[in-house]
Amino acid sequence: MLPFLDHTTEAFAADPYGVLRSAREESWIVRTPTGLGVVSYAGCSALLLHSGFRPGVFEFVRRADPRGRAAPTDRTLLGSEGADHLELRRVVMPWFTPRRIEALREQTVLLVESLVDGVTAAGGCEFMSDIARRIPPMIFCWMVGCDVERGPELARTSAVALQAFSGDPAAMDDVVNAIRELRRFADELIEEKQRSPGDDITSALVAGIEQGVMSHRDARSLLTELLGASVENTTHTMGLALWLLCRHPDQWALVARDADLIERAVEECARYEPVIRYGNHFNDDAADLLGFRVPAGTLTTIYLTSAHRDPDVFENPDRFDVTRRLPQPQLNFGIGRHFCIGAPLARMEIQEVLRAITARWADPRLGAGTSVSRAHSSEVDLLPVDFTPIRRA
């Protein structure tokens, strides 16, 4: 009999890493209230690469909302497989190439430095509202070709829509209303680009419609999916990075002294405290996973927080170390066919934020009212921080 793990309990909330450590020491696979769970790095990576398992978030949503109001009715990157997935991915992938990301970096640096310089003289700020919640929405607007003034509103609406993945039936009415608003936004933007195309993702989607690669509804679903993926997760990952570095001043000092550590610091933050703490997958047919037979129709949860602290892969896994060279990739962005296409963009944004604040702030201290929740995903609600401004030549 497999051990049982329930991540909805108070005991889990009080000590998630301790509960997961105990489970992992007993077995790499466990039973959960919704099916099965995988707690080792090898198991999680094997499942992500297994063609027999598909992302199960929409199956999870359907169970929470049997009326089907919150699940997408058209093709999405996360919800499609095979030829459909490749077709959609080919349309948007050119917007996430290294060349495109580097072209965006210069704009991003100017935006980040403007925001950070605007609060530095005061010796403190509320990081989420002053910086983190302002950068990803604006960059999304640049990329899809809409008015940047829409960014904050879109981010707020998307955050509500993403509550669908919590599986909480009580949230579904708000979720459905938010999804309707996002679809309305996407319809209006698509119609605008049909009249006046530009050099942006939405115009590329319009071209896909005209070429018969996708429908208008597919394009609408992709726009709303890209909004959630590129804004909400990146925003909270920025907050988590600052939260971790403030709690580990020795690590802040290392990054401040050596900007070459920025890239490693971003990866270590994502390993140590992933914004996506676990994810659901579904297999339509029975599948073999590392020698274990998973019955057809099983909802299997991968616990990234456990995989990222697996001592079989990461030496001293409970130590936060920005000098660490990861022997295996952190799984926050996935691996395999569903690897997040926006990963290079998110990495670039977070790198530039850390570069700017470690160059301008010394001795950062978390203020009263700091609020970080770690349930289905890690969310930073409030992050007041005080610091000593660095006098720059």
Image: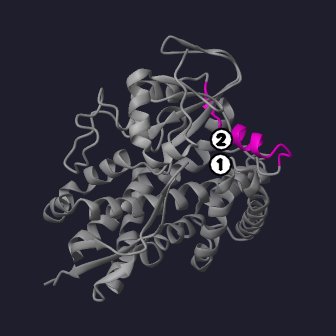
SS under mark 1: helix
Label 2: few (<14), some (14–19) or many (≥20) C-alpha neighbours in 10 Å: many
Q: Is residue 246 left or right of residue 10?
A: left
Q: Which residue is mark 2?
A: 57
Residue 178 vertical position relative to residue 272 in the rendered view, above or below: below
Residue 69 vertical position relative to residue 189 in the rendered view, above or below: above
User: Does the magenta segment cover residue 63?
Assistant: yes
User: Residue 76: percent from the left, percent from the top?
Assistant: 68, 45
Residue under the image location 57 percent in, 33 percent down:
301
Q: Earlier in the sequence, mark 1 or mark 2?
A: 2
Residue 83 vertical position relative to residue 73 in the rendered view, above or below: above
Label 1: few (<14), some (14–19) or many (≥20) C-alpha neighbours in 10 Å: many
- Asked if one can make out residue 348 in the rendered structure from this viewpoint, the answer is yes
Q: Amino acid at mark 2?
A: Val
Q: Amino acid at mark 1?
A: Phe
Residue toward you, 234 or 75: 234
Q: Residue furthest right?
A: 67
User: Residue 242: percent from the left, percent from the top?
Assistant: 34, 64
- Asked if one can make out residue 40 in the rendered structure from this viewpoint, the answer is no
Q: Is residue 385 left or right of residue 293?
A: left
Q: Which residue is mark 1?
A: 165
